Amino acid sequence: MQRILAQCNKELVQFKRDRLTLGLAFILPLISLFIFGFAIRLEAQNIPLYIQDFAQTPLSNSYVESLLADDKFETPSPSQLLFLQNQLSQINSYQEIIDQGIAKVVVVIPPEFSRNINSNNNSNIQVIVDASDVNNARIINNTIKRITTNFLEQSGLTRSATKIIPQIRIWFNPDRQEALYLIPGVYGVILWLYPSLLTAIAVAKEKEEGTMLKIYTSDISATEFLLGKWLAYLIIGMGQASLIMVIGALIWNLNLVVEPTSLFIGTLIFLANSVGLGLMIGVKSDNQIGAIQAVNPIVLITAYAFSGFIYPLSNLPFPLSIIPNFVPLRYYITITRDAYVRGIGWSDVWFSIIMLIVLGILIFNNARNNLKQMQLLD
């Protein structure tokens, strides 16, 4: 134990002396938090919309106002309208408005719009949607339907009373705040990337500078050497976690909705996985550049594709659906979203805690076995 603590103290002293690494270790996570927190949006906003109203009646004008009042669509400014009019004089069809990127959705209201509605007849409007982005197309389609339904109800134009009226209650996140869903996941991505990156660079640096050979010839074991580094960067990782969670609470007003023990223990074990990944990669890398090039794709691919950070894991086809079972970030995101959104507690996250422990042991053993083999080869 004394050797492990001595190795840990050595790592912390070296880390503290390197002012550049010390600064980047805490500045980069903050930058990432701001970029992810403010840049990522799951729902499209300010979608360019062009409306051609051939009816020009009070009813059609009211419908146009309903479309433009929704925050999903972007209201053209006077200068944009003038530009559109100049462009449209050279365009032969509404499809070309989409093709040339002038708008993402075109709504055409026919001349008989108001007459048909007042006569209790159906009035068809034409809606052309740019579906090159499938998610945006789905949002546009649902938004147009919702606005139209609300417009008919508010105008008293529904033909008959609805037989089924669902009473919908939004659970966990009634205000539908995107930050409440995204930021807890961002915590996981940041703590998956930076502790592992710092650890991998530190181990690879020792190999690159030749100091690893002194360790091979000393009486310190591979387990003691790795545990010393693991403990040091676990402490640094806890500092990073505390910083980003405090900043996240201040900026996005994120508050825990469950007692903090599950989040604290889950964060500690997850950081052990992250640092262990850095040890495993650092041991296998010959230099710092190689360590960076190995950490980045592993972390980023698992974070975006196999963790449930943005897209549901149920969307993954077999056999790719097997991979998330071995990604620690997948389980940690479950823990953070429970702590900040769901609020169920241990009954919801106990399995994730166990899986993080199992994966952490496997990752650390892999790093230790690789270091032992290198000692035997040398």
Image (cartoon, rainbow, N blue to C red):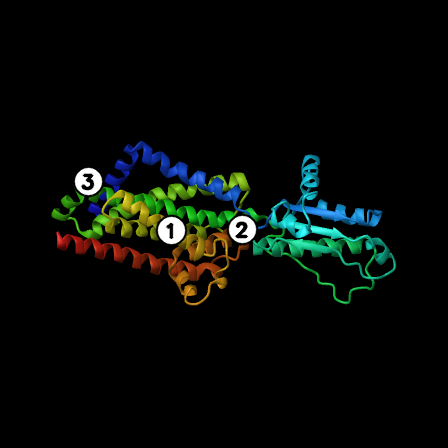
Residue 37 sits above or below residue 317 on the image: above
- The residue under the point 81% across, 64% down is 161
Mark 2 and mark 3 in contact (Cβ < 8 Å)? no
Percent position (x, y) of residue 14? 26, 36
Relative depth, front residue between 66 and 266: 66
Percent position (x, y) of residue 143? 67, 54
Label 2 amino acid? Tyr
Would residue 301 be found to the left or right of residue 176 on screen?
A: left
State the mark number for residue 136.
none
- The residue under the point 33% across, 49% down is 295
Percent position (x, y) of residue 214? 14, 44
Q: Nearer the viewer, mark 3 or mark 2?
A: 3
Q: Secondary structure at mark 2?
A: helix
**Residue 275 visible from this viewpoint:** no
Label 1 amino acid? Val
State the mark number for residue 181.
2
Percent position (x, y) of residue 256? 52, 48
Question: Callout 1: 10 Å neighbours few (<14), some, many (20+)?
Answer: many
Label 3, on which residue?
209
Q: Nearer the viewer, mark 1 or mark 2?
A: 1
Question: Callout 2: 10 Å neighbours few (<14), some, many (20+)?
Answer: some
Estimate the spatial distance between the alpha carbons at disc 3 and disc 2, rounded to whole Å.
43 Å
Badge 1 or badge 2: first in the primary sequence: 2
Mark 2 and mark 1 in contact (Cβ < 8 Å)? no
